[in-house]
Amino acid sequence: MKKMKHLLYLTLGLFVFVACNDDNESGPSGLYSNGAFILHEGNFLKSNASVGFLSFATDSFTEDIFSTTNNRPLGDVLQSMAIYKDKGYLVLNNSNKIEVVTISDFKQAGVVEGLSSPRYVAFYQNGGYVTQWGSDGVHGTLAIFDIATLKVDTTIAIGSGPEGIVVINNKIWIANGGGWGIDSTVVVFDPATLKVEKRIVVGYNPKHFTIDREGHLWVLCSGNADWTDSQNDKPSSLVKIDVNSYSILKSVTIGKNAHPDKIASNRDKNIIYYGAGYGFNGIWKMSIDATGVENSPLIEGYFYGFSVNSANDEIYTFDAKDFASKGEMTRYSANGTKIKSYTVGIIPNAAVFNK
Amino acid sequence: MRYCCWVLLLLALTVLRANGAGADTINIDAVEVSRPRFEVLSVGATVQPVDTFLLRISRNLSLPELLSFAGLNINNYGPGGLSTVAVRGMSASHTAVVWDEINLQSPMNGQFNLSVVPACFLDNASIQFGGSGVNYGSGAMTGIVHLGSANLFQQPDQLWFSPALGSFGNKSVGMGYKWGNDRLATSLKVFMQESDNDFPFKNTADYYQRTIRQTNAGLKQLGFFPQLSVRTSDRSLMKVSCWVQEYDKDIQTMMTSSTPNLSHQDDRNVWLNVLWKYADSAYVVTVRNAYVYNSILYTDPAQGTTDNYSRSYTSELESRVGIRHNHWLQVGLNYTFDQAFSGGYIGNVKRSRTSLFLQYKIENIARRLNIAVGCREEYVSHFIPLVYSSGLEYRFSQRWRVTANISRNYRIPTLNDLYWKEDAFARGNPDLQPEWGWSGDFALHHRQNLGELLLEISPVFFYNYINNWIVWQPDAITGKWEPVNKSKGKSEGVELRLKLDYNWQQFHWTTVASGQYTYARSRQSNGQWSSYPPDYVPVYKAGLNQLLSYRNVTVGYIHNYTGKRYSLGQRLPSYQVADLFCQYTILKRQFRLNLQFRVNNLWNEFYQVRQYYAMPLRNYMFTLMFGFLEK
């Protein structure tokens, strides 16, 4: 029975595509295979976003492969990237577009235009599903574009500051991260009916998802910082959701004044990592069976983002330094031992791994 | 208290001296009321004035366009764009902008947008390079943009009207009059402008490489500039000037954006200057009271509307006294009160500044040498360390002279630096110290008459060093941006200016060629000097202005080259832009009619002054100017 259960979860996992994390390992081979795409946000209103590539074969880092390949700038504020089939989808938040590239050589292959502060993208059948904050950062929407034509077909109001997005069991799951306000809901969207099927109340400002080995969905709720009076802060938490019954199985408080921004899981999906974000110290790990958070972080430091390579459980941290000059990426082993640091581009925020 | 006593004593001394020296009666007309004090008392400074002829024929341009037109090194961001001047490799907040001696820099961010100033409101404009203007106080570290209005009593009565039509829906009208008699003179200038600024360009940042029209780059402007001068006695006059303006502009969409920008900014400016001046042959006293109001109403879909505005009140007493026949002592006392309102501040922010400044000048020593020394002490809740300057000018011969100056300068933190309320991303730092630094330049001037040809050539070497440079950077722990006194900056370089003037009968030809090399660096957080110059500081810059006049026809060609620049370490391409204009003037007794046709960006260069903000390709402007001058 236990084996059957694992098989079920494994099958379930095949239908899950998580935007902008390390879970996508199905990319094709080519010039940019067997490595990691390093995403650099670049500076707001400078249009200096870039993508670098770390080759695992040569352990060498190549800067700005989009502009070099396509002889034009990528855009303003690279928020995330997702790989689907043979294409890479680069979400440019302040350019209101998604640049599409052929993942093997990073040559431009199209553009999705007319978005409104897009954040993350996931795919289901022939559609791309984009979370976007909207022009005011409060009235967030889900934009759906046709993968073949790259035209936006539908835009649906979804919540405040929709952020992370995953596809599970033919449903689109969206974390309403609050945007410039506060929200506390995760939305289950049915792509067949184009309707919101369920709103699940979780913690304050849910940001991103990861799936554990039991097929449960974990959502990182960042909480909310009140910068005028920290007594009014809303706590951060990790919330575990049953994807079938939509019920909350567990909620673990991280801290009232702690506001982590990113979440990931390891290869066996029995460990959850969370951390990074403004003023949050460290990358922390937590067993999916734990009832509370650990006392100290796995990796000390203030990071702008982190990613986990699920092929070997190596953790990549991203330090934006002074946000004006080159940032630093550091690889750590699964137990938090530093392996190597690399000088990368301006404001690195994540890695997307490509076998 | 000790300083107050010194101030009173010095002012009293100059007044006593004045009573003794005022034997010669002098008509106030003989005194250049609007003449900036740097012209009178500074020595050794490198100053580039805008030619008055160019000023007269550029009434429908904005100040950055005028300065660029006049061959001064300034970035011109096009209609509606924010335009600041950064002199000699340092930042815009290190260059003061003064209008009739009143500093226009915002106390909130230390900058002033030159784009909002219509050229027709000015009677003179110049850039003083280097830090020799210590008397102008905080912010005048590497240069000063001097704007000025003329003495109304020295102007003929006149009436003028100047409509213009240009490409991309650009329409503007300037008009004005001046009327007066021996005791009273008034003038009013009005300027209106509207532009869609929806120029077409090939978007090289676009996937499809489409030729599109620029979006959200329009502007509307309406400004008034009334002046009133009253002769209060044979030796004194009072002048009241007031600039009131609204400048409504859209924020241009970047080339990389797939949707139009929806941001909008409404600038409102009020500048009121009440001046009283007394002058005799050896003594000049000036009292200024000024009010400067700057409001920025910024509307953005994400943030709604944010209203930031500041008020500055300035009272200044300046006394200049002649000692012997060639010595001048100037003593001044300045009090400025700044008040700012912003949603970004904790409450309303106020700041008082009191300064004492002195300048001493000796002219014509052995008929060859002029020297000047000056200093300024400012009190802003505590005493800012004394700043000072010294300059000399030595004339070797009729043809050759050298000028040199060295100064220690300062800039106090802006109100944003100090009082920005802590939010998710940023906070101010009330513990900031003022920036201070050194500035110096050395110039050789050659002037030679070769019959009908006049040749002027001036190589200038300059050096600037700034300590405690206030830089906004993220805190290592919280990641929040905050200003710190961390960085140092330095710049050095050479400027070369060559002017040829040829006059033969009714034929007049002027060529001004200029070039600049600047090596500028800032010290990074790791203690190393940066590999690149500060953002948008060109290493090389050059210009060529040609002006050809024959009888009533004038043709001008202006060519500017901007060499390689960097933005956040990324190299930006060089560009060169040329403008051509042709003017025909009809003079009929007191009536004047100018017909002017301008071609901007003559060679259709696709370029960006700020990265990924497109600039218009070749475009046109037609201007008429009707004028009636009383002889």
Image (cartoon, helix red, strand yellow):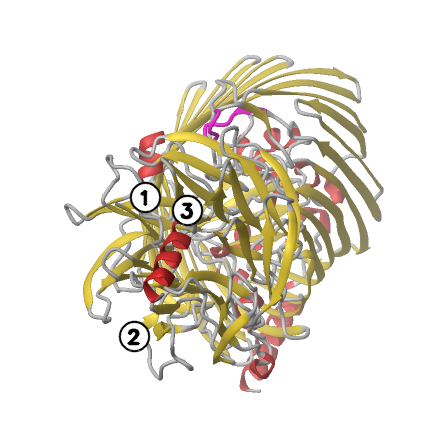
Give percent across and percent down for residue B508.
53, 17
Q: Magenta residues?
A: B200-208
Which secondary structure, mark 3?
strand
Q: Chain of mark 3?
A: A
The lab-note entry on whether marks 1 and 2 share a chain reads: yes
Instruction: Give me the residue at 79% from left, 29% from top.
Output: B160
Residue A48, quarter of the rendered image: top left
Q: Main secondary structure of the magenta part?
A: loop
Return the residue nearer the eye: A88 or B163. A88
Q: Which mark is residue A81?
A: 3
Give percent across and percent down for residue B326.
49, 56
Give percent across and percent down for residue A158.
64, 53
Q: Chain of mark 2?
A: A
Q: Which mark is residue A298?
A: 2
Q: Is residue B279 left or right of residue B613?
A: right
Mark 1 vs 2, N-terminal side: 1
Of circles 3 and 1, the one toward us is 1
